[in-house]
Amino acid sequence: MESERTYDAAAFVAGLFGGWTGPAIGLLDLDAFFASVEQLDHPEWRGKPVIVGGSPDERGVVSTASYEARVYGVRSAMPSAQARRLCPDAIWTRGRFDRYREMGALVMGILADETPYIDRASIDEAFFDITPGRFSAENPVEIAGRIARRVSELGITCSIGLGRNKTVAKIASERDKPRGLTVVTPGTERVFLAPLPVRAMSGVGKRAEAALARAGIRTLGQLAEASEERLSPIFGVNAARMRTRAAGGEVSAVRAIDAAEEVKSVSNERTFPRDLTDPGDVEAAIALLGASVGRRLRARGLAGRTVTVKLKYSFGEGHTVQRRLEHPTDDENVFVPVAVELLRGIWTPGTHVRLAGVGVSGFEQAGSVQTDLFCEVDDRGAVASDRRELSVTMDRLRERFGAGVVGFGRERRFSGGGAVR
């Protein structure tokens, strides 16, 4: 009942605010999204600390922690081993990303019922434009409250920030979590932002925060008052823009959502429990990651032209390279050999690889390029149709009997784990 009281109050607040003038931009942030979905699907986990992420025994990291786990200091991106020390009784799960995407799509559907102007920032965040007169004449606060109520009916919750631009909406969404609805009414942006620390605004990292502190600038109000000359050594050509944002004067655009742009890339990456140095191991990892990407592409009916390979080394550095294919494909038998060639350009045997990733982007709908997909010719002139058919058959077997029913020998090298994200 707590969430209902919170959201019912939104309608009362809307009446106090009266008519809204100017843009109305919201930011919806799903509360502890992955962990909340796990608690929804596992009722016995509700009210208990839940951590979604890689194993503490295999150099994993925390993806999401429930609010019960956050009480112990567990946070996203924290090493799993550290999280286990802080919260030894937590329930651990590697996560089910297909399920999270399914729930995320339901939330996006709720937003789409209210406005076509949506910018999805991530799987659990989206900006939306509910400016009166652009798509609806209704008070934006009432719309935001209704969105929050409908999300709670799915069995998860969200926090929403509402203001006249994206910067204000983003900061507002973080002020009262979980189940918060924070409204910054038109004309009050500067008052709302002024006392907040500079780090509250995106684009101000640790280095910029330290440089600003040396210049005597610690709050967004001080940042808004600083001269461009004073800020240029810190932000370069973005100095004027950062000052405008800190003053609440940013002008934000939210485009009408385009379903074809909803998914911009399909990728898979893995952090390994031990560094890889052998060419056979690294190439097998690229092939395994590519096979997963191929399955996801086919499941979504997507075909891409751009292949990306990402590596991170144990000493902290990394490389990302891309190549554009002549034909769009969803077949790992075509793009994995390209990925291996890219790998050889950025890695030498013996160098310790901590993380590897493979991605495909530059999409075309699979149905529009059916001839290329089912009679593919790779860069070496080899027809890949038979190999793709084998991949499709394996997809169907996994779907029917489970992921472990069939696989290649390379998968056994990494069956012991490594955080997959």
Image: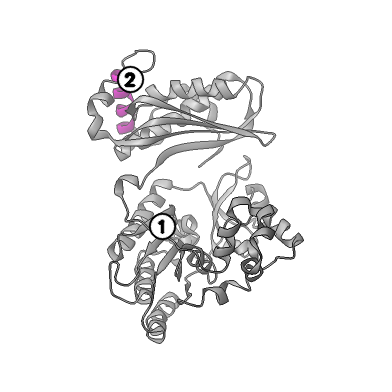
On the image, the x and y values in percent for residue 86 come to 67, 57
Q: Residue furthest front?
A: 229
Label 2 is placed on what type of residue?
Arg
Quarter of the rendering containing residue 383: top left
Where residue 73 appears, as percent x and y from the top left, is 65, 61
Of callouts 2 and 1, which one flags the residue occurring earlier in the amino acid sequence? 1
Residue occupying the point 48% across, 75% down: 184
| Colouring scheme, one of rainbow, by chain, secondary structure, one colour | one colour
Residue 203 in the image, given as x and y percentages of width and height: 58, 55
The boundaries of the magenta stretch are 384-397
Q: Nearer the viewer, residue 47 or 96?
A: 96
Q: Main secondary structure of the magenta part?
A: helix
In the rendered structure, which amino acid carries the disc numbered 1? Asp
Report which residue position mark 1 lands on.
Answer: 41
The residue wearing badge 2 is: 387
Q: Decide whether residue 356 is among the magenta residues.
A: no
